Amino acid sequence: KTLTGIVSDSMCGAHHMAKDKSPAECARMCVQQGQKYALVVGKKVYTLEGHESEVDKLAGTRATVKGTVQGETVAVNSVAPAKTASK
């Protein structure tokens, strides 16, 4: 399955608690403290398993993740920056 959303972390989801940090910095900080990277798609938050170094580079940005979805977890096969929609 292919999902596109914002790369965040499993604790904060779409609402980062560290107001003095960018979404990317907050996500990386939470992951360093033991959280998992997550993908926020609309109102759903999927925990991402695998390819952490590639996901880390995209923290706080829109990304397209391909993988196997089981409940609220995605076993990541690949991750790439999301193509921006033309305005």
Image: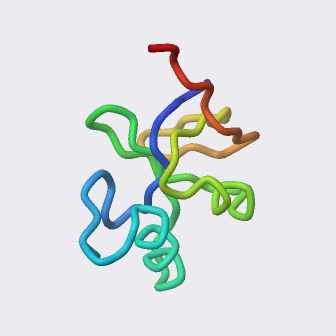
Image x and y of residue 71, in percent: 43, 39
Where on the picture, by quarter, is residue 57? bottom right
Total labels: the figure holds 0
Residue drawn 52% across the image and 30% down it: 4
Where on the picture, by quarter, is residue 81? top right
Image x and y of residue 40, in percent: 39, 43
Where on the picture, by quarter, is residue 55? bottom right
Image x and y of residue 76, in percent: 68, 45
Image x and y of residue 83, in percent: 62, 25
Residue drawn 52% across the image and 73% down it: 28
Residue drawn 25% across the image and 73% down it: 19
Colouring: rainbow
Residue 57, above or below 39: below
Q: Residue furthest front?
A: 87
Q: Quadrant of the C terminus?
A: top left
Residue 32, above or below 7: below
Which of 49/24 is in front?
24
Q: Left of 74 or right of it: where is 46?
A: left
